[in-house]
Amino acid sequence: MLRVTGTVSAVRRLPLVVRSQLPLSAIASRRAYTDGAFGKKERAEEEVYARTKEAEQIKQLREALAKKEREVDDLKKAKQSAGAAKK
């Protein structure tokens, strides 16, 4: 995974392809926040949002992986049954 160590402006200078692969928390945690309670609340809300979006993406990827694994299993079973039918 790509690690961002700069500021938001440094992230904006990255190519769009690279930026789209960054987790939202990497970008959100680099923002310049105001000091005080409001800034802390804003930062916390953005981190919750970023984590929620990442969790949704992970869930979708796991579902897609499970579907592909089922398809592979079905193809293996079809191949085995076709091989057994030839003998």
Image: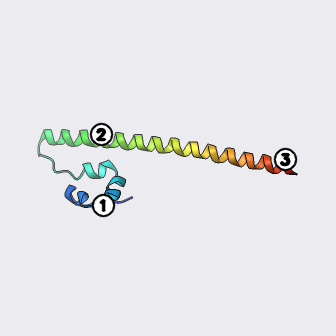
Residue 59: give its label. none
Residue 49 image-quadrant placement? top left
Mark 1 crowdedness (10 Å alpha carbons): few <14, some 14-19, many ≥20: few
- Proximity of marks 1 and 2: CB atoms separated by less than 8 Å: no
Inspect the image, locate mark 2, and give the three-letter code of the amino acid beneath it.
Val
Quarter of the image with the N terminus in it: bottom left
Mark 1 residue element: loop
The disc, 1 or 3, on the residue closer to the chain's N-terminal end is 1
> In the rendered view, does 69 fall on the left or right side of 11?
right
Q: Residue at x 34, y 42 (%)?
A: 51
Inspect the image, locate mark 1, and give the three-letter code of the amino acid beneath it.
Pro
- Proximity of marks 3 and 2: CB atoms separated by less than 8 Å: no
> In the rendered view, does 64 fall on the left or right side of 50?
right
Give the percent coordinates (x, y) of residue 29: 25, 50
> In the rendered view, does 41 fall on the left or right side of 52?
left
Residue 85: give its label. 3
Along the viewing direction, whichever of 13 and 32 lies nearer the viewer: 13
Give the percent coordinates (x, y) of residue 45: 24, 38
Q: CA distance from mark 1 to mark 2?
A: 26 Å
Q: Which residue is mark 2?
A: 48
Give the percent coordinates (x, y) of residue 30: 22, 53
Along the viewing direction, whichever of 73 and 30 lies nearer the viewer: 73
The disc, 1 or 2, on the residue closer to the chain's N-terminal end is 1
Which marked residue is nearer to the observer: mark 1 or mark 2?
1
Inspect the image, locate mark 3, and give the three-letter code of the amino acid beneath it.
Ala
The disc, 3 or 2, on the residue closer to the chain's N-terminal end is 2
Q: Which residue is mark 1?
A: 15
